[in-house]
Amino acid sequence: MQIRIEHRPSPLWLRTLIPAIAILSTFLLTSILALLVNVNPLEAGYYFVIKPLSGRTSALEVLVKMTPLALTGVAVAFAFAGGYFNIGAEGQLYAGATAATAAGLHLHGVTPWLALPIMLAAGFVAGMAWALVPALLKVRLGIDEVVTTLLLNYVAIFGVSALLNGPWRNPVSQWPQSPDIAATAIFPRLVPRSRLHFGFLVALAVLILFWFVMRWTAFGLRMRAVGLSATAADFAGIPVPRTLLTCALVSGGIAGLAGVSEIAGIHYHLIDAISPGYGYTGIIVATLGQLSAGGIALAAFFLALIDTGAQTVSRVLGVPVYLGDVIQATLLLTTLAALLLQRYRIRVLHATSRSAEGDA
Amino acid sequence: METRSYPYAIEMRGIVKRFGPTLAGDHVDLAVRKGDVHALLGENGAGKSTLMRILYGLYHADSGEILVDGRPAVIRSPKDAIAHGIGMVTQHFALASPLTVTENIILGRTPNFRIDMDAAHAQVQAAAGRYGLEINPRAVIGDLAVGQRQRVEILKALYREARVLILDEPTAVLTPQETHQLFTELRRLQQQGLSVIFISHKLHEVMAITNRITVLRHGRVAGNVETRGTDERALAQMMVGRVTRPAVKPPAVEEGDPMLRIADLHAADAKGVPALQGVNLTVRAGEIVGLAGVSGNGQSELAHILSGTGEAGRGAVRVGEKEITHADARAVMAAGVGRIPEDRHAGVVGDLSVEQNLVLEHLDDFRRGGMLDHKRIRSHARALIDAYQIKAAPGDRIRTLSGGNMQKVILARVLERAPAVIIVAQPTRGLDIGATEYVRRKLVEQRSRGAAILLISEDLDEIMELSDRIAVIYEGRIMGELTGAEATTERLGLLMSGVAHAALGAEA
Amino acid sequence: MSDIFSLTFLVGLLSATLRVATPLVYGAMGEIISERGGVLNLGIEGTMFLGAFTGFAAAAALSNAGVAGYLWLGLAAAILAGMIMGALMGLFAVTLGVNQHVSGLGITLLCTGLALFGFRLIFGESDVLPKVTPFAQIAPLGATSPAGVVLEQYLLTYIAFLVVVPVSWWLIYRTRFGLNLRAVGENPEAADASGVSVARTRYASLVLGGALMAVGGAFLSLAQLGAFTPGIVAGRGWVCIALVIFARWHPVRGMWGALLFGGVFALQLRLQTLGLELPYELFLALPYLVTILALALAGRNVAYPGAYLKPYHRE
């Protein structure tokens, strides 16, 4: 018997199973950690993926968690689709959150019909602004955007800290958190007795817009062409630098919206732990979702589930909450590996069946 | 040390190699006598390179055996091949350009973990002297001319004690003069006992340098003859399998208006070195002007500028009355220029579909109410696939197409808009005979339609077959122009090697 | 403000510069060796973090058990963890040949998760930061003269500058491994055709690189802090990625880059203590901004290794 890898796609049934294969291998791999802390992996698995969905409150909480992940997921996917490796969604989220807070502090008495669009616009523009420098460096000077966007994440977080320990320090509590934003700037709740807020609708709208742009617009197709082959795109008369720039800025803007949503929908004021790494998780979401809107929605939902589950598992079984992070990272890696089935097929050749080679 | 008794250096017996559905090697036999220069002759895609890659351990044969010096040899990797005294110089030099000559030569042959660079330089120098190949061991590969790099490659193989040297189309990148020097060096090496397998599709070269010839066609051996006992015509017949038929070219139409005018055009290459130094060229409606030249004499830069993807310096390019010297691709297309790029893969987005690639240059024409009209994109693709006999579905990712079909997609995309000027570079490189003939026929059709065509090609046969006029480029200058009737290989060769036009003395 | 020009200030600055630059030297050499083979290892940030944790956790356990050489054994544990992560990067970048950006980031996320998980598991959620007695500094010239004070450093700092940098240079330019590595990173087809195993060379470089990165992380926990905190690496890995581009993949230039960054970092630490009326976070952000600036100035038109980011499969 001989195992051979061929450079052509696996059969369709196997390709549709890619997420399942990735999830199953992630479960098997992370079971080792569960066993290490004397927890039954199946029991942990139950708390991770089933328990959160079995109750109304926790199920809605999954959607709450899904909101920023869907937004950063689209942000990253938008950039990746254009061949721009924006790893700076975290920093852009912080920028968006800061701008939303700044706007929200001054929106007292403004009707929500005006206040909410202002909040969103402020966050979007701030996210774009935070993405601008790496994008210009990339387009004008050819400086690798991966490093610059990554480094700016730290700058953004330090910047927020500086604000919170300085001008925005809460005058009452003296804690490093800003005053609350105006009541009219707060996102309305969608479901009573839950934290699910207007930001979820924003995320859905962004997902639909993303789908629309990629599927139905000339810009979407041009952007994909640039992402797949800048040389060929240039040859076809597509303005590569301008496309890249747009792609980078829009990506930053969407990440900024995630910041707005966390401020206006959850916290109502700026804190320096506004994101536990949503910007980085966005990379996992985009990869799992294979840069498609539907895929991103599912991936964001699943990762939100794991986030929620990690809290439960930590509470109920006493497993460190970081197990969720390990699972998410493992899932990213197993997905990367499983995605190879799109390009290659694995064949097991038996010594006796060599004649069966010519099939299509 | 050699076993003189056994006559063959290499024997390959019954080699079979399959790539998916295509049979690249169909029970191929090859026997190379010691001290021979043995030609492996065949059209592109006949299986020459595949066979040699098997011999060098880069591919594995599905069945068949290899004998070295009469003993069966298992060659699973280049390492095995080298151990058996087999060396290979490929078309794309296997050299790392930021490394020095010495570093490239001793790569994979370092006896100790620590390398004594001075000693290594001395060794390489000595080896170069021994084989009569002049080279500076301390030079960085990136700074060397093409002919010198090839010499490094040959020296590298000999340094590995190669007794059999595979040269894969070694003259494709050389001027006739460099080729001449290569042949001199090969004859000397042959006298030192080296066996050479010389892969080529150029008949006169094969006749000039080899002792014996194996002809491949469609992965099979089509002939195996002594060079002395054959001639070019017989070889051509074996190669092609039928009498070669020149592309049907109707007589030249009357002189059209000048459509493409290039005046005193300058440009630099990617490193900032002058690549074009005052090119003057005019192409009229209804004619094909061939631009001949050895690779790397400014053709690529010129093609890029004319396609709107390069950066021009001084000078002017006009299409009709419109100046496009510094125009981008979009403006160049708007001026009525159709472009067929020298690298097909740089002209299409491999992971987009055939239908998407067909509309990518003119997406704005395929919108309805601001949205992409997928229905029309699909029907547009269907129509072109029919018209150009493209073997693919509209939704296929274009990277899965064969070279010929990919080229047809590009042709379809360009020609359906009936451009006034067509810039076409290396249109048949790497295509099989059928596709080559198809492409050439289409170009001739366009000429009859009245298009002004600039054909940039390194394939002299192609240039001579298709062109009404032939210009020769050398170091970024046009060395001279000949009419199709005046052009002979010799005259073109002299121009291509930079011998000034006037020196020809034959100009009417 | 005249403090800036005082000898004490200068001595403190130089001394801190060497100390801050040390983990960067390890990280940058590790990354240079990885990238010379053509693989961008964005797992560096996580590998340093995991190295810091593994080193600390092992040292703490051994120290509690009363083992004498607990610090060095902790360092060895960190090296082992780094090698494993290097090999994992190899699995994705070499064997599977998938996107190096995403798989590298995945490894960083994995390392971060594993380290935090392990830390919480072993040390619980205590308010008291667990500590070990860290490496002591050595002062070959005594600690009285200004030069002596500057050179009062950890042994790991000495090793970084006097061993790791020159050996990296020697390894890359004067050994079989280095020649193979450069060939594989520039033109894997050529290396393969010369009988050099592309996969084996790349794996070796990633494993070696991972080990160096982990030492960089372990330096922070076992020498500088004697503790492990979630913010211990704080983007130093990413800075190393920038340094490598800045250094154009040359170890000695990489060392200068690390010193430059170390200098800026040390300077901002000093400036904070001068009581300027600026938020200290802005000083903290300064080194990252300087890194971006350095890239913008020196990172133009750099010649990346020919096979950078490109997986190699024979065919």
Image (tube, coloured by chain):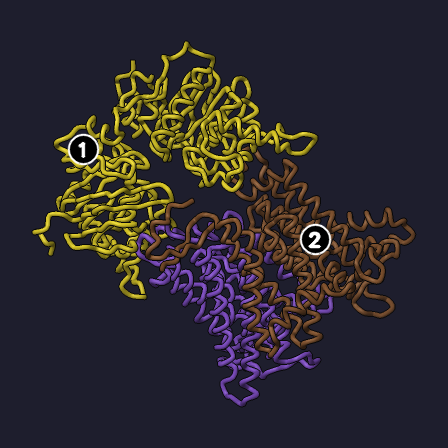
Chain colours: A brown, B yellow, C purple
Instruction: Give the residue type that dot 2 points to.
Output: Leu
Q: Quadrant of residue C129?
A: bottom right
Q: Residues within 10 Å of mark 1 (few under 14, many from 20)?
A: few
| Residue C260 appears anywhere in the view | no
Res B83 visible: yes
Spatial separation of the CA atoms under disc 1 and disc 2: 69 Å
Residues under numbered marks 1 and 2 in contact, where contact means CB atoms less than 8 Å apart:
no
Disc 2 chain ID:
A
B365 or B380: which is nearer to us?
B380
Instruction: Give the residue at x 60% y 79%.
Output: A38
Q: Residue at x 70, y 30 (%)?
A: B369
In the depicted structure, whether residue B57 falls above or below residue A319: above
Residue A105, label in figure: none
Image quarter in which the N terminus of chain A is found: bottom left
Looking at the rendered structure, whether the residues under marks 1 and 2 are on a common chain is answered as: no
For label 1, the residue is: B208
> Looking at the picture, how far across and down is residue B317, in whole percent?
50, 24
Indicate whether B325 appears above or below A89: above
Q: Position of residue A22 (x, y in %)?
A: 56, 60
Which labelled disc corresponds to residue A71?
Answer: 2
